[in-house]
Amino acid sequence: LEKPRPRAASFAGALEGCSVGQGDVERGEVHRLLLASLLRAGVQPSRMLTDIVVLGCCGTLLERLQGPGFVLSLVLGSTVLTNLGASVANGRMVAAALANKGIDQASGDVSVSAPMPSLARVSSTSGGVTALGVFCALRHGRWAAWPGLPLPVAWLMAPVFVATLSAFLGYGGQLREYKAAAEAAAEVAAIASTEGRSASSSIAPDVSVLDVVVSLAACEAVEGRARAACQAPPEDVVAWREELEEAVDRLPPQPPDGAFFADLCGAAVGVVAAIVLRRRVV
């Protein structure tokens, strides 16, 4: 375990750094507002392709018309604003769902009596790209998306609208499932407290759920390499994997994905930027 455990912990820490929650911003970790849009884990390939097309076509058009400095400022500034708005909105939605359920979501600390649901976070967001596309569609919607291509710029935002609407419609169901899981965890903790035993998992308090998942993947990779070499897996790795598998069953419920809030905020930022620039021109 001298090599896989520290490497898994380091990798999990890097992944966790590419997400942002309301508690992270309150602690001054503002760099997460940019890093949350760098990680694209779990994103549908169609959405990733759409973001690339919107960034390439709209960014190229606006760079010719407004200059590279304007495009860079719009993308970076809107990314920070939309991730901030998404983290606050998702955090408040989750906190409202857990209200009066004996689970504290305000501080982000894991030292509570009931199994603590992870602090609501957002990652793999595209708010900056959405803001760029909405701005370009409002200002130059009838222009060709690419020279020689008979496709208006405004049409590029149709897949983004569909993806955001789909995520919005599914968020309510995810929030209800999360609420039910959190209530069940709180009930188990309450029963265990009355019986004088602990309902907490074997996971250390300072270890996140992401650490457990990444560590389990590292164990499986080590065992797979050993089997490929016709060797028995290391006993300490096998014991570590068994411990992690037992802990997986007791992981706290995970909040729903609120990345679509960044798209909503991005659309608002794009509209405001288009209105402000239009007034300046007039």
Image (cartoon, helix red, strand yellow):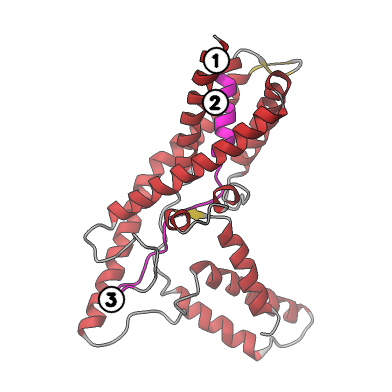
Whether 276 is drawn above or below 7: the answer is above
Q: Residue furthest top?
A: 282
Circle 2 Cα neighbour tier, 10 Å, few/some/many (<14 / 14–19 / ≥20): many
Identified by mark 1, the residue type is Arg
Start-end of magenta stretch: 112-137
N-term mark: 2 or 3: 2
* Residue closer to the observer: 77 or 194: 77
Circle 3 Cα neighbour tier, 10 Å, few/some/many (<14 / 14–19 / ≥20): some
Q: Which mark is residue 280?
A: 1
Q: Which residue is mark 2?
A: 134
Q: Nearer the viewer, mark 2 or mark 1?
A: 1
Question: CB of mark 2 within 8 Å of CB of mark 3?
Answer: no
Q: Nearer the viewer, mark 2 or mark 3?
A: 2
Asked if residue 75 can be seen in this view, the reply is yes
The quarter of the image holding the C terminus is top right
Q: Which residue is mark 3?
A: 189
Q: Secondary structure at mark 1?
A: helix
Identified by mark 2, the residue type is Val
Q: Residue at x 24, y 81 (%)?
A: 193
N-term mark: 1 or 3: 3
Question: CB of mark 2 within 8 Å of CB of mark 1?
Answer: no
Whether 171 is drawn above or below 21: the answer is above
Q: Residue at x 63, y 33 (%)?
A: 73
